[in-house]
């Protein structure tokens, strides 16, 4: 696993909310996953200062929190875009043309795996099997699975996300 | 061949998250029967049924429960492994979505058997759509007294809660899964001590796959003798098979154990998609071997497949058509293991990377017999040296390719251009 260098500063107001969530489980290290899953919707990334607050409030070491976060591939330590696209790179999708789907995403968004679009809308990563093999090649955008894609249809899908982006209305 | 729907008997029926709807189909009858039995009797019934683990290893379920039963402890746990990470597998997702209560019922019965009062379902994070289904089912089970204190008026109590994974294939290994539930990195533990003695939170624990636990509910509803009458002598009951890849009709199918692999592919799944030919089949998920088309006329029975050098595993059948190159596929698979190795033990951390690099070198047409011999050494090392099952089985795919597809490998060694391998790069590295 690559070591990730991160040096972002989380806003104080967000850290206060993180502290509230984590404090409820002081002395319950087994609740770390639940805390982190909740916290990740509040902060831009599970950065060092977030790990420090969780560690202090739960009564565990910061090292334990950060090594936990970096172990699991779905826990981001770098800020992500508003939507995260995960494209399955495993063999059952591969034989059904996942390479073309990945190419479609990369050509359309002009980013490579691991990168975020300039407007901060999409983060694109590769991932292991999503368990949607009956409709491979498959991707997930946030919590929604999409299957039976190809070079064109994945671009149509992304266009729909851009068209219907609710956040755009607020900008 | 007709499917035999036992586990999937409630597929397509509405409201199966509702305990009342489940009870109306005869659900929780098995639990009511088990509540009148003691732990030893429940384990004896499971022994009679011949049920074996559906997660991959095929270990007798009664024996797993007996280890936890025999260990004295005030606290014991039942853990359900719903971390279905094996590429090409989605049977547990389908099962949990269409009949969640059969899993809960199996967990309560298993808890009754070993004297546990708490159960955890470790659900992978890639299934966010399954979590609300399970949660509604659990809530509904509490309302109908199938969970909680005084289950169905008895003095037995049992609670179930869901714990989430966060994308780590290795967490499907039982001790890594315990570590993850405890809020640590999902790194496997040394064994022994085994989970039956020292499992979750250091207490005796029985960990089973979703399908195994769901089977327990059917065994107690219909009886061990009924269950033992299905399938083959060594592998009883039905099995969920996930057929993925280049077949016409992909999906999850349920058949008695011992169904013929060739018939499954050609009769039930409509053969190879788009009128192409068959190149290879991989059984048992990514850690299973690739076999040639002339080797697929075999019964899918745990012992038979194992004896012929294969692995039934979790029942995955991954079909590859002849527009692919087997080396390109195996490169993708070895990249997967190199990526998913947790990095705790050196043989697996370094070994999986070296295997992936050498396979890639051969794919690109730069390999020689020296590389093949190096692969053989790595294969032998990986079979014995790593700490857990991930490492042990990580070289099975390439080992099977060297055994079954040597002419293809030789073509690549000779530098004969392979369109697939040169232009396509499998995996994510």
Image (cartoon, rainbow, N blue to C red):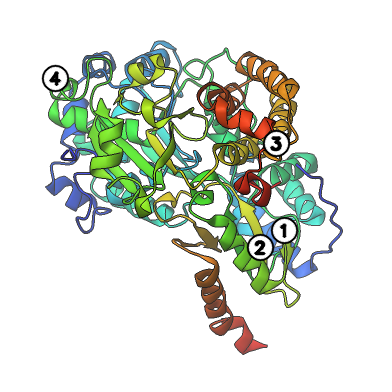
Q: Nearer the viewer, residue B274 or B311?
A: B274
Return the chain for callout 3.
B
> In the rendering, which numbered label is found on residue A124?
2
Have a look at marks 1 and 4 and say if they share a chain. no
- Residue B395 at x, y percent in the picture: 60, 25
Q: Nearer the viewer, residue A32 or B253?
A: B253
Question: Are the residues tagged 4 and 3 within 8 Å (C-beta)?
Answer: no
Have a look at marks 4 and 3 and say if they share a chain. yes
- Residue A102 at x, y percent in the picture: 61, 61
Residue that badge 4 annotates: B225
The mark total stands at 4
Q: Nearer the viewer, mark 4 or mark 3?
A: 3
Mark 1 or 2 closer to N-term? 1
- Residue B218 at x, y percent in the picture: 20, 32
Visible residue check, residue B341? no
Q: Nearer the viewer, mark 3 or mark 1?
A: 3
Label 3: element kind: loop
Label 1: element kind: loop
Visible residue check, residue B363? yes
Question: Are the residues tagged 4 and 2 within 8 Å (C-beta)?
Answer: no
> In the rendering, which numbered label is found on residue A114?
1
Q: Is residue B314 left or right of residue A37?
A: left
Question: Are the residues tagged 1 and 2 within 8 Å (C-beta)?
Answer: yes
Residue visible at 36% across and 42% down in the picture: B243
Q: Alpha-carbon distance for marks 3 and 1?
A: 33 Å
Q: Alpha-carbon distance for marks 2 and 3?
A: 35 Å
Q: Alpha-carbon distance for marks 1 and 2?
A: 6 Å
Question: Are the residues tagged 1 and 4 within 8 Å (C-beta)?
Answer: no
- Residue B316 at x, y percent in the picture: 40, 36
Q: Nearer the viewer, mark 1 or mark 4?
A: 1
Residue that badge 3 annotates: B415
């Amino acid at each position: 696993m690559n070591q990730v260098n991160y040096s972002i500063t989380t806003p104080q107001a967000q850290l206060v909310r993180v502290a509230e969530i984590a404090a409820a489980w002081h002395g319950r290290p087994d609740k770390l996953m639940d805390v982190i899953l909740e916290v990740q919707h509040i902060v831009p990334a599970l950065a060092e200062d977030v790990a420090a607050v969780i560690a202090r409030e739960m009564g565990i070491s910061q090292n334990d929190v950060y090594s936990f976060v970096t172990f699991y591939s779905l826990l981001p330590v770098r800020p992500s875009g508003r939507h995260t696209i995960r494209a399955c790179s495993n063999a059952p999708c591969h034989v059904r043309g996942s390479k073309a789907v990945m190419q479609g995403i990369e050509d359309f968004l002009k980013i490579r795996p691991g990168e975020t679009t300039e407007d901060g809308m999409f983060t694109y990563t590769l991932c292991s099997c999503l368990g949607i093999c009956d409709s491979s090649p498959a991707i997930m955008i946030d919590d929604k699975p999409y299957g039976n894609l190809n070079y064109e249809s994945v671009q149509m899908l992304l266009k729909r996300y851009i068209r219907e982006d609710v956040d755009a209305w607020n900008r | 061949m007709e499917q035999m729907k036992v586990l999937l008997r409630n597929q397509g029926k509405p409201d199966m998250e509702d305990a009342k709807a489940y009870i109306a189909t005869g659900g929780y009858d098995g639990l009511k029967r088990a509540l009148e039995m003691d732990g030893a009797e429940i384990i004896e019934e499971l022994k009679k049924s011949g049920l074996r683990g559906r997660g991959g290893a095929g270990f007798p379920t009664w024996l797993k429960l007996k280890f936890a039963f025999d260990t004295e402890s005030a606290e014991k746990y039942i853990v359900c492994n719903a971390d279905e990470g094996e590429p090409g597998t989605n049977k547990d997702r389908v099962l949990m979505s269409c009949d969640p209560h059969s899993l809960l019922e199996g967990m309560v019965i298993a808890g009754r058997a070993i004297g546990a009062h708490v159960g955890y379902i470790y659900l992978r994070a890639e299934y966010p759509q399954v979590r609300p289904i399970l949660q509604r089912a659990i809530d509904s089970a509490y309302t109908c007294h199938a969970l909680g204190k005084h289950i169905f008026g008895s003095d037995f109590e049992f609670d179930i809660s869901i714990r989430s994974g966060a994308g780590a294939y290795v967490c499907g290994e039982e001790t890594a899964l315990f570590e993850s539930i405890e809020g640590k990195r999902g790194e496997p533990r040394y064994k022994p001590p085994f989970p039956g003695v020292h499992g979750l939170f250091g207490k005796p624990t029985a960990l089973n796959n979703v399908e195994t636990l769901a089977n327990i509910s059917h065994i107690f509803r219909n009886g061990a003798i009924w269950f033992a009458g299905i399938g083959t002598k060594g592998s009883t009951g039905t099995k969920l098979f996930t057929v993925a890849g280049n077949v016409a009709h992909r999906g999850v199918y349920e058949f008695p154990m011992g169904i013929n692999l060739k018939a499954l592919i050609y009769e039930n799944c409509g053969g190879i998609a788009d009128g192409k030919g068959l190149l290879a089949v991989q059984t048992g998920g990514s850690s299973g071997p690739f076999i040639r088309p002339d080797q697929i006329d075999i019964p899918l029975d745990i012992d038979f497949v194992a004896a012929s050098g294969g692995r039934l595993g979790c029942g995955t059948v991954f079909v590859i058509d002849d527009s692919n190159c087997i080396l390109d596929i195996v490169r993708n698979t070895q990249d997967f293991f190199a990526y998913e190795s947790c990095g705790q033990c050196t043989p697996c951390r370094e070994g999986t990377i070296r295997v992936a690099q050498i396979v890639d070198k051969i794919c690109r047409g730069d390999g020689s017999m020296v590389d093949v011999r190096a692969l053989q050494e790595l294969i032998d090392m990986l079979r014995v040296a790593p700490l857990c099952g991930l490492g042990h089985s990580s070289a099975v795919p390439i080992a099977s390719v060297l055994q079954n597809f040597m002419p293809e490998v030789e073509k690549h060694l000779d530098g004969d251009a392979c369109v697939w391998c040169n232009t396509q790069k499998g995996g994510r590295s």
